[in-house]
Image: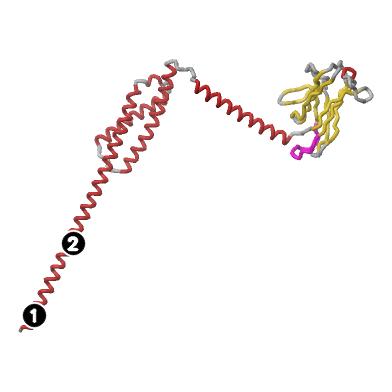
Amino acid sequence: MDKNLNKKKKKYYLYGGAIAAAVLLLGLVITTIVLMKQVNDTRLENEQLALENQQLNLANEYEQLNTEFQNYENQSKYLTNDSLVEKYAEAKDKVEKLLVELKTQKITSERRIRELQSEIATLKGIMRHYVEQIEALGRENAGLKAENQEIRRENTKLNTQVSEVTRQNEELNERMTLAEKLNISGLSLQALKSNGKKEKRISKAKQLQVTFTIPQNNSTPVGSKVIYMRLTNPEGSLLGESGKFEFEGSKIAFTERKTIEYEGKEIQGITIYWNVNTALTPGKYTVELFCDNYRIGRNSFTFEK
């Protein structure tokens, strides 16, 4: 009898413990769910507060923009650019509509906040451009057209820089041209007697002899080359005229010419003669040589009486 009673007591104790454990577990689950809901509600509340704070900041920025638009609206008469006036009007309407949205609607999207921030940046850009136009036109209408000293200095500096760049470009173009054109060296001018010997007195010369050398230049195209010579006296007048040639889009008279065959190798002692047919006076004589539409050589020589 006692044994059966003990068994029943043990069974009751086990059932009671299981029930108590289940109740405790259920309490823990319910407590956990409640806490998680509270945490989630707090997070959502914080996010909403952050959005509301951003919305308030945006409203202040748009309010400031709207004030700036109103400050300059009466000055739109200075604008003659219809496109600019139209863009200004569109931007002003957009500011007013966004102000209404920010003040009357509750923004619940981070994405919408970013869109509004982007629109602020765009509208500020339009405003800056508009203000710059108004200020510039206002200065002009007020007669403020005179340049100040700083602007003149900057313009002078800019002009100097432009001139330097232009000079460098010209030098570069010239170097490229020199790499391709026919070159000469050792250019000389000699007065001769009728027997071909040197004549010291230019007034008695029967011939003028121009001598030069063409160095090797692998960049110059080979083939037949016509070299045109121009001789000018101390007064700057051309001596003789055997015809004209093309140079930089114009027809230029020449004294004599000579045709050579150029194979890319050095050619020494090339001579061009001109038979004197006018009175020559002491002074400086200038020799110019042209080939392939380039001036390939120029030098001046002084003869005494």
Residue shown at the point (19%, 55%) measured from the top left = 34
Image x and y of residue 154, in percent: 52, 25
Quarter of the image that includes the N terminus:
bottom left
Image x and y of residue 157, in percent: 55, 26
Amino acid beneath label 1: Asn
Image x and y of residue 192, in percent: 90, 23
For residue 282: magenta? no
Examine the rendered structure and indicate whether residue 25 appears above or below residue 169. below
Examine the rendered structure and indicate whether residue 57 appears above or below residue 146. below
Instruction: Please identify the quarter of the rendering in which residue 99 is found.
Output: top left
Q: Nearer the viewer, residue 195 or 116?
A: 195
As drawn, the residue found furthest toward the right would be 195
For residue 220: magenta? yes
Residue shown at the point (22%, 55%) measured from the top left = 36
Quarter of the image that includes the C terminus:
top right
In the displayed structure, does residue 201 sit left or right of residue 225? right
| Pointer 2 with pointer 1, Cβ within 8 A | no
Q: Is residue 201 visible?
A: yes
Say which element carries label 2: helix
- Which span of residues is magenta-colored? 214-225
How many angstroms separate mark 2 from mark 1 (CA)? 33 Å
Q: Nearer the viewer, residue 167 or 265?
A: 167
Residue at the spot of label 2: 28
Residue at the spot of label 1: 6
Mark positioned earlier in the residue sequence (2 or 1): 1
Instruction: Please identify the quarter of the rendering in which residue 122 is found.
Output: top left
Amino acid beneath label 2: Leu
Say which element carries label 1: helix
Identify the main secondary structure in magenta. loop
